[in-house]
């Protein structure tokens, strides 16, 4: 479950693109056409090539383009087709906070602070709404045992100076009358807001295109190019593109075969199943994001109620499973009985890019010309603005801002990769 340990062993998917309605996917899956109606040609050279058009890759590209750099983004599928279209869109710095990670909390709070301006700029540039909802999050306890654990969470929030308040059961039900009477207590996190990922991805796609970024969807990066001991571009399915900097933002796939031998990026896929229900005037819906120990429930402006999400160590197993759906529906019904009458609109699976310490990996790789932005785990939307700021600062000004210092790849201890790069250069030379 998002934010809590999984309480059921769930379980197994088609990528989100295959289960969201066709009307939602058409916009995101269409490659950027040239004026003649054909996909644009890959440019011979740019300042920055970004691998991956998820929320992280596109946010970085948008920001770099605003700095006046020429940028090309490549995705082997459509924009958002990785984890980004599978997300709920919560910006939950407080509700997501776990004990013992003050630097990650500082990063999350900084990004949360940046979100309103980031969202307004995105809406202004794209002309599209992203359904930013600032009604906050209610973390609720259903029954006595859960109250004790919620108190622990409240104490943690107080120690960290987070703006959360303790509510009794009647106060929670006054805020959300549709919740079951067994709701015994709650924590209100007034700054934990939400956006609609489908709208954010559509807006980001439009915003990067309007900023002059070359967006190449359905165009896989097959290899990195090396020369003079550094990365100097990418080889794609549609041709080679030289770049002064390559940013690897390939989500859960970042640790794959693009990396030079010897460079280890400790990121793995962490599977999450989720579903969307359709609320009606008869069923009613929720005004706040509601978290229980089992699920989160987030109502969107178009009437969908998102129920998420399982947390499963299953590699890239994309199955949507009976056990996963059962755990989600049972958890949702336990808090909000009206879901019984709602139609199921869609079910899906996504792969969170999770590092071994659950924190993002941002910045230099130890390989000249190669920068990384991945490992955003359960918080890619929350952390997108601060990630884009950090990578822009590194690429354009040569240094990462203080708030992101703790998140370098070097925290895992990095092996030297110079020899492997030399080998790759020799191989490349032999092939040409
Ligand atoms: C069920 C679920 C719920 C979530 N809920 C939330 C939430 O409420 N709030 C929140 O902040 N976060 C949430 N997350 C996490 C969030 O979705 C991720 O952290 C975020 O989407 C990661 O973005 P990304 O751009 O790094 O990766 P991705 O979105 O996975 O993008 C990576 C892209 O790289 C592309 N790619 C891979 N290899 C190549 C290659 N060789 N060449 C070209 N392209 C390539 C892929 O096609 C993909 O599009 C959730 C995740 C899941 C699964």
Image (spheres, rainbow, N blue to C red):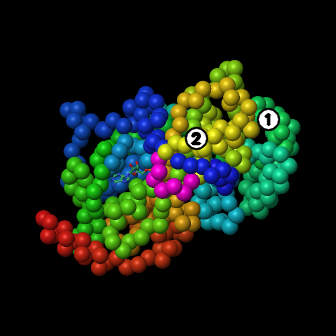
With respect to residue 389, does 41 lie above or below?
above
Residue beneath disc 1: 180
Which corner quadrant of the image does residue 212 belong to?
Answer: top left
Distance of label 1 from label 2 (alpha carbons) = 25 Å
Residue pictured at 60% horizontal, 26% vertical? 343
Horizontal side of 396 relative to 354 (left or right) equals left
Between residue 115 and residue 42, name the one nearer to us.
Answer: 42
The label on residue 322 is 2
In the image, 97 versus 304, the foreground residue is 304
- Please indicate, yes or no, whether residue 327 appears anywhere in the rendered image: yes
User: Within the magenta stretch, is there residue 317?
Assistant: yes
Distance from mark 1 CB to nearest ligand 1 atom below 8 Å: no
Q: How far across and how far down the image is residue 265, in percent?
A: 44, 67
Stretch in magenta: 312-318
Label at residue 283: none
- The secondary element bearing badge 1 is classed as loop
Q: Position of residue 288 (x, y in %)?
A: 70, 37
């Amino acid at each position: 479950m998002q934010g809590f340990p999984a309480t059921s062993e769930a379980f197994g998917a088609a990528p989100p693109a295959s289960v969201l309605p066709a009307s939602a996917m058409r916009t995101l899956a269409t490659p950027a056409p040239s004026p003649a109606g054909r996909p644009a040609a890959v440019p011979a050279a740019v300042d920055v090539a970004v691998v991956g058009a998820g929320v992280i890759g596109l946010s970085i590209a948008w920001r770099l383009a605003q700095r006046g750099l020429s940028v090309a983004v490549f995705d082997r599928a459509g924009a958002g087709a990785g984890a980004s279209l599978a997300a709920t869109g919560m910006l939950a710095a407080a509700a997501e906070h776990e004990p013992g990670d003050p630097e990650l909390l500082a990063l999350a709070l900084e990004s949360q602070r940046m979100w309103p301006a980031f969202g307004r700029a995105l809406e202004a540039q794209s002309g599209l709404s992203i359904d930013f909802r600032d009604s906050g999050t209610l973390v609720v306890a259903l029954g006595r045992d859960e109250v004790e654990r919620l108190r622990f969470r409240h104490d943690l929030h107080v120690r960290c100076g987070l703006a959360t308040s303790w509510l009794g059961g009647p106060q929670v039900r006054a805020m959300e009358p549709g919740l079951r009477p067994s709701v015994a207590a709650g924590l209100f996190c007034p700054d934990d807001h939400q956006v609609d990922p489908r709208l954010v991805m559509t807006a980001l796609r439009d915003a990067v295109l309007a900023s002059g970024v070359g967006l190449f969807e359905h165009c896989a990066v097959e290899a990195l190019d090396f020369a003079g001991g550094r990365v100097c571009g990418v080889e794609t399915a549609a041709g080679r593109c030289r770049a002064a900097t390559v940013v690897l933002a390939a989500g859960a796939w970042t640790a794959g075969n693009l990396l030079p031998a010897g460079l280890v990026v400790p990121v793995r896929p962490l599977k999450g199943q989720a579903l969307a229900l359709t609320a009606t005037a008869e069923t009613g819906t929720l005004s706040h994001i509601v978290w229980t120990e089992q699920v989160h429930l987030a109502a969107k402006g178009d009437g969908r109620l998102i129920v998420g999400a399982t947390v499963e160590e299953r590699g890239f197993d994309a199955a949507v499973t009976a056990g996963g759906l059962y755990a989600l529906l049972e958890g949702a019904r336990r808090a909000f009985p009206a879901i019984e009458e709602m139609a199921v609109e869609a079910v899906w699976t996504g792969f969170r890019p999770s590092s071994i310490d659950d924190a993002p990996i941002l910045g230099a790789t130890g390989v000249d010309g190669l920068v990384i932005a991945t490992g955003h785990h359960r918080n890619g939307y929350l952390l997108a603005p601060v990630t884009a700021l950090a990578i822009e600062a590194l690429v354009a000004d040569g240094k990462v801002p203080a708030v992101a210092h703790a998140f370098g790849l070097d925290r895992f201890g990095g092996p030297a990769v110079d020899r492997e790069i030399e080998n790759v250069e020799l191989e490349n030379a032999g092939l040409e």
